[in-house]
Image: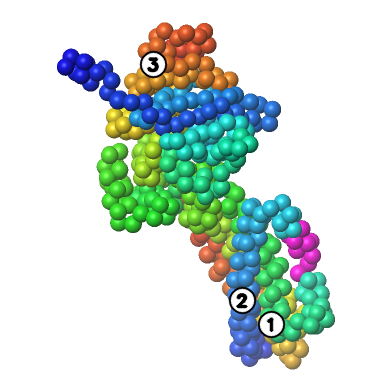
Amino acid sequence: MNTFAPLIKGYWYLLRGAGMTLLMAGAAVVPATICGILLALLQIFGTRALRSAVVAYLFVMRGIPLLVLLTFTYYLLPLTGIDLPAFWGVVMVLSLYYAAFMSEVFRAGILSLPQAQWDAARSLGMRRRLMLQIVIFPQALRLASPPFVNLCVNLIKATSLVSIVGLWELTMASREIVERTLAPFQIFLGAAGLYFCMCYALALYGRHLERRVLHGH
Amino acid sequence: MNDVSSTAIEAPRVQYRPMLEVSCISKRFGTLEVLRNVSLSVGAGEVVVVIGPSGSGKTTLLRCINLLEDYEEGIVTVDGAPSGYRRDPKSGRRLRMSEREIAASRETIGIVFQNYNLFPHMTVLQNIVAAPVRVKGVARRTAEARARDLLAMVGLSDKATEYPVRLSGGQQQRVAIARALAMDPKMMLFDEVTSALDPELVGEVLAAMQQLARDGMTMIVVTHEMSFARDIADRIVFMDGGGVVEEGKPEQVFFRPSTDRVRLFLKRYNDRYRI
């Protein structure tokens, strides 16, 4: 029992850290999703120049480790004169980074619909916007939801990197407690458990969505 | 007096009014010419059945009529209005209409596809009312009442709230017919609508089409059902190699074909399907 005393004493601190982690992931997932959908649409319907620009962006984002991007932005932002609180700076980086992956998920969802669905919609006199709104998106978003949830799990875990630029969340909170208690195993076991609970819940939800997609209505 | 009564019997259609004019359209897929200089005129209320071997351009012709497929030359008009391209009166050049105009012209042409292409995330009723409500701006209640009438016409009144996956192929195809009719099109195109169906389900779809033909709908039907073609057609068009080889009344094309190509096709067909 004594072995786990540091963890029991610090549990409230860790829980608050986990809350911060969720808050950060939640704040990033909304703009990441919106940007992801926009990027997917640009990549499918944009002019040639726009499409190339989007593809270039995707390659850059996929080719840089998030940790490097976070650190780089951390030093770059003050130089550009943009005065952003650290939290929002990090949320912005996470959003832009994950938008690239989200766009691939949505693009795959949209393109996996058979051409016949587009034909049917067009033949009824629908124009592109309406077609997307009532025929394509409802089906594509359903198809995209399992990989989307998967990305969200990824995003939660990725927030552990932001402690490198001094932001306080679950990983940072754990490190602080460890510095005071010198009990790294117990504390990080607790942190890992909390991460696991958050991600597992989401992953279960993803599995549920996947079954719904596979078996229709 | 005699004259009046005899004309009434011999000429049920008072006057030939062209509903569709396809003039000299050509289409290529790369180097392959799928349509060569095809022209076709269909009168209001006329039922034209297009037959011919696979790859002869029948389906492509239908898809070009409402510009689901683009074509390089020629012009299509529906009820006098260009659909897709118009000629510039001064230069004679062919100009593509705007997307808005093209969409508006598609509203006037109903099409039913081989694989039904219903929207799987909508119920039968939603499938039918979606376009009238969202494209034409018909009040939802009016559109739903009309949809139920159409479902009754195709014999599916009890399926309004089902999703398409719960229906048989024949039922789905009849919903697709109702969905196209809900836009009140001036003409209907049928693209091998029974080819994907179990033989037992073909009859119910053909019956719906026959009903439609009797009601005076202008129809172009691409099919491999020869006996149906003979029954329903006012005119048969035989296509091969991207062009129209022969056309005429059903009895003429089926029993006294004037070209060897048609003779050969019909012979093969008869050999194949004689039980």
The residue carrying mark 3 is: B249
Q: Nearer the viewer, residue B184 or B212?
A: B184
Disc 2 to disc 3, C-alpha distance: 70 Å
Name the secondary structure under disc 2.
helix
Say if residue B165 shows up in the picture.
yes
Disc 3 to disc 1, C-alpha distance: 78 Å
Q: Nearer the viewer, residue B126 or B188?
A: B188
Of badges 2 and 3, the one in the foreground is 3
- Image-based side of B95 in relation to A162, left or right: left
Instruction: Residue at 74% x, 75% y: name it.
Output: A161
Which percent across, then down, holds residue B16? Answer: 36, 26
Ranked by sequence position, the earlier of labels 2 and 1 is 2
The span picked out in magenta is A56-66
Q: Nearer the viewer, residue B32 or A27?
A: B32
Circle 3 chain: B
Say if residue B275 shows up in the picture.
no
Circle 2 chain: A
Neighbourhood count class around disc 1 (C-alpha, 10 Å): few under 14, some 14–19, many 20 upward: some
Q: Are marks 3 and 1 on the same chain?
A: no
Name the secondary structure under disc 3.
loop
Q: Amino acid at mark 2?
A: Ala
Q: Which mark is residue A73?
A: none
Instruction: Residue at 33% x, 57% y: name it.
Output: B139
Q: Amino acid at mark 1?
A: Phe
The residue carrying mark 1 is: A87
Which percent across, then down, holds residue B202? Answer: 37, 29
Q: Amino acid at mark 3?
A: Lys
Name the secondary structure under disc 1.
helix
Neighbourhood count class around disc 3 (C-alpha, 10 Å): few under 14, some 14–19, many 20 upward: some
Magenta stretch encompasses residue A62? yes
Is the residue under label 1 in contact with that under label 2 (CB below 8 Å)?
Answer: yes
Q: Nearer the viewer, residue A152 or A28?
A: A28
